[in-house]
Image (cartoon, grey):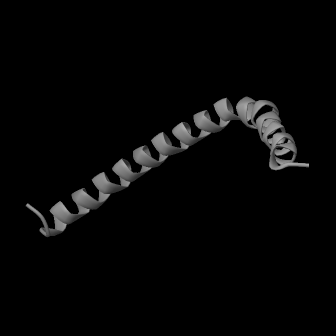
Amino acid sequence: MNLQDLLTPVGKFIEWTFETVLVPISSPFNLGVIVLGLGGIAFWLRKQRQYSEKARQSGDII
């Protein structure tokens, strides 16, 4: 028994994992991350606008 006999099944298992598990969930996962990021940016910009307006009213910024 040599090292190749041990590594070949491990490599085939990793390849099988990518093809059957990771590839099918990659598209919804990527979409979820993008939507979450855009939602976070929109939330942050809205809050930043509120903070800036409050600072302008109190005279903290010009």
- Asked which quadrant contains residue 50, the reply is bottom left
Outermost residue on the right side: it is 1
Outermost residue on the left side: it is 62
Foreground of the two, 26 or 3:
3
- Asked which quadrant contains residue 35, the reply is top right
Please give the name of the residue rendered at 36% of the width and 49% of the height, measured from the top-left corner.
46
Please determine whether, in this image, residue 32 is positioned above or below residue 48: above
Please determine whether, in this image, residue 33 is positioned above or below residue 54: above
Please determine whether, in this image, residue 60 is positioned above or below residue 47: below
Please give the name of the residue rendered at 85% of the width and 48% of the height, measured from the top-left corner.
2
Please give the name of the residue rendered at 73% of the width and 37% of the height, measured from the top-left corner.
22
Foreground of the two, 17 or 22:
17
Q: In which quadrant of the rendered image does the C terminus lie?
A: bottom left
Foreground of the two, 9 or 49:
9
Image location of residue 44, percent across then percent down: 39, 52
Q: How many marks can you see?
A: 0
Q: In this view, does 18 lie to the left or right of 62?
A: right
Outermost residue on the front side: it is 1
- Asked which quadrant contains residue 20, the reply is top right
Image location of residue 52, percent across then percent down: 23, 58
Please give the name of the residue rendered at 59% of the width and 33% of the height, measured from the top-left corner.
31
